[in-house]
Amino acid sequence: QVRLVESGGGLGQAGGSLRLACTVSGRPFDYYIGWFRQGLGKEREFTAVINRAGSVTWYADSVKGRFIISRDLASHTVYLDMVSLKPEDTGVYYCAADDRINPYRDTGFRDREYAYWGQGIQVTVSS
């Protein structure tokens, strides 16, 4: 059983930066890890995903160039570094894991494609 726990986040200012962390337990090397977010009254949306080795990443257009997803294999942690924050980045951020997705084949960009989820963590960006 995979368990994901998010940490970090909180309150940031427009133009500022925040870092989220997702600690993965239970076969952590077997999974692609994705970050999703959900604004108030909005559907959960894809943000970024990273491969098992931490060597290849994919991003939503809305965060490309501002967010960086990375993976520390030693600590089983996936990070989401967010810079140049915007108020529209506000929402609950979730990390998710699955061993079946393959972004090269257009999977891993939808929340329904992930089997395991963290509890979510709030990020609020003030203007």
Image (cartoon, rainbow, N blue to C red):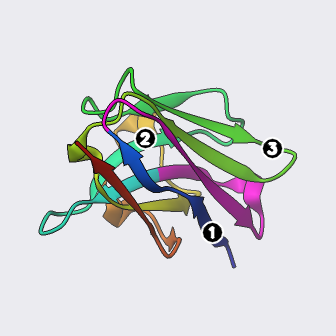
User: Do residues under tags 2 and 1 come within 8 Å of each other at their CB atoms?
Assistant: no
Residue highlighted by disc 3: 73
Q: Residue furthest left?
A: 41
Question: Residue 18: where, in percent of width, then height?
Answer: 50, 42
Residue highlighted by disc 1: 4
In this rendered view, identify the residue nearer to me: 34 or 115: 34
Q: Is residue 116 above or below residue 105?
A: below
**Residue at the location (42% across, 33% down)?**
16
User: Do residues under tags 2 and 3 come within 8 Å of each other at their CB atoms?
Assistant: no
Give the amino acid at mark 3.
Leu
Point out the stretch of residues depicted in magenta.
14-34
Q: Earlier in the sequence, mark 2 or mark 3?
A: 2
Q: Earlier in the sequence, mark 2 or mark 1?
A: 1
Give the amino acid at mark 2.
Ala
In this picture, residue 28 sits left or right of residue 47: right
State which quadrant residue 86 falls in.
top left
Whole-number angstrom distance, CA of label 2 to CA of label 3? 17 Å
